Amino acid sequence: MISVIGATLKKLRDDAYDASLSPDGSQIIFRDSITRDIWIMAADGGQARLLIKPDAGFHFFWPTWFENGQRIAYYKYRATTGLANLALESRDLKGADPVMLVSSPRITDYFFAGPERLVYAVRETPPNQYDTNLWELRFDPKTGRPQGSPRRLTDWTGFYFGNPELTADGKRLVFLNGRQQSDVYLGELSGGGKELKNPQRLTLDDRVDWPGGWSSDSKTIFLYSDRNGHFDIYKQGVGERNAQPLVTGAEEKWAPQLSPDGKWVLYLQGQRSVEGTSVPATKLMRAPLTGGPSETVMDVTGYATILSGGDPTFSVGGFPSFRCPASGSTCVLAEGDESQVTFTAFDPGQGRKGELLKLPAEPDFTAWDLSRDGKRIAVSTFDHKAGDAKVISLADKSTTRLSAMPWTQLSAIAWSADSKRLYLTSASSRGTTMVAMELGGKPAPLFKQPSWDIFSLMPSPDGRHLAFGPLTTNANAWTIADFPGK
């Protein structure tokens, strides 16, 4: 809290996110970043109490006050086997009487445009999944119950209604019209893998591109991109400006990697889900590196991307996912549910071979990687206060715990080519720092970018390059000068 006539700051509470001040200025609702509950407290930080605790598997976001100050609204989110469930729900100030206002996995933002009127943004269906439009819903301000059916307010293309705010007189709307995209960058590793030089953008389109694996000679990187409206597999040389299609088709395809024998490009494949229906099964596929039709290796549990729309972060990481070593015949598949992550050995030609390890599922994003010799996995967990990573032996399950402190909020992890160090990314409000950490030493900064979030790291087999996938946002502030009151 800060006075408008002075510069003295007063801390109200630690670990509080998504804070919202009541209309009369007397109370604050917020989400606790550690427990993930919704709390309420006095405006001076006192009298804090738990208001709502989510059921197992659910997450709450962005609590906001009704204009009459008698109820709060919030996002209620759950993802099961890749199917996103998102609802805008309200409750009274005792945390009771839950009422659903709107339910759709494509809701992106909302605001109250009067005591009885909710306006919210909805992402369009493919191929326009990067556009949103505004809808309105009338409701009873006392009970929070909807009155009538939602009504579309805009039918525009090329717009995204982000962070919408209405002026106090209700006549002017301001919003951020932005677009997120990811690209593949390459940097040169030097100093024994402890320095990253000359990061250069490899993919030059304006779509979503993520790095996959490398060719065995470290001259070509495999990537996946939605430049044709859905994710296909491509390959691109380190010194080339254009990517060549490798596997195309109507299905969604992710995370290409080379098989240990160098004969196949392995990848995950699934059908795009229709909203409100079950998610089709995901398959692990193989395509001959020399060209030819793809073949199914095996079915896998889960879906490789959360289908809540066109947000690029939902198309990288997560479970299922897989990694392959530099040699041998056994790769590792990770499949997750709400309670645990199961690591299984598989052969690119024969399929599943046996379970290797089970780990408890973490509530926040978890990244993992397989060492180049195929003997260990490294796991990191996104945590606002800690920078913990674990190295687990697949042979005897022994665990070594590492700390990347003072860098926290770890969002990606990768082994170096010689399996002697880890590369991690640490995301914060100050930007993203890429960190190199020797297994028995201290972490050291490798690269920093103040406006990127980096979710994918792929060192080359020869240890000379590091491919990484930053997420960038471009946005401008727009206004609608005469926002309709009805």
Image: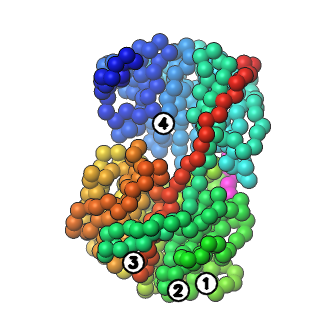
Marks 3 and 1: in contact by CB < 8 Å?
no
The residue at which mark 1 appears reads as: 289
Secondary structure beneath label 2: loop
Q: Nearer the viewer, mark 1 or mark 4?
A: 1
Real-space CA distance between mark 3 and mark 2, rounded to the nearest whole angstrom: 18 Å
Query: Which residue sits at x=56%, y=48%?
Result: 473
Picture quadrant of residue 181: bottom right
Number of other residues with Cα within 10 Å of mark 1, as a class: few under 14, some 14 to 19, many 20 or more: some
For marks 4 and 2 on the same chain, the one whose residue lies earlier in the sequence: 4
Q: Amino acid at mark 4?
A: Phe
Q: At which x and y percent is residue 359?
A: 37, 60
**Label 4 – label 2 distance at C-alpha:** 45 Å
State the SS at label 1: loop
Q: Are marks 3 and 4 in contact (CB under 8 Å)?
A: no
Cβ–Cβ below 8 Å for labels 1 and 2? yes
N-terminal of the two: label 3 or label 4?
Answer: 4
Residue stretch rendered in magenta on the structure:
272-277
Mark 1 to mark 2: distance in Å? Answer: 8 Å
Q: Secondary structure at mark 4?
A: strand
Please state which amino acid type lies under the numbered disc 1. Leu
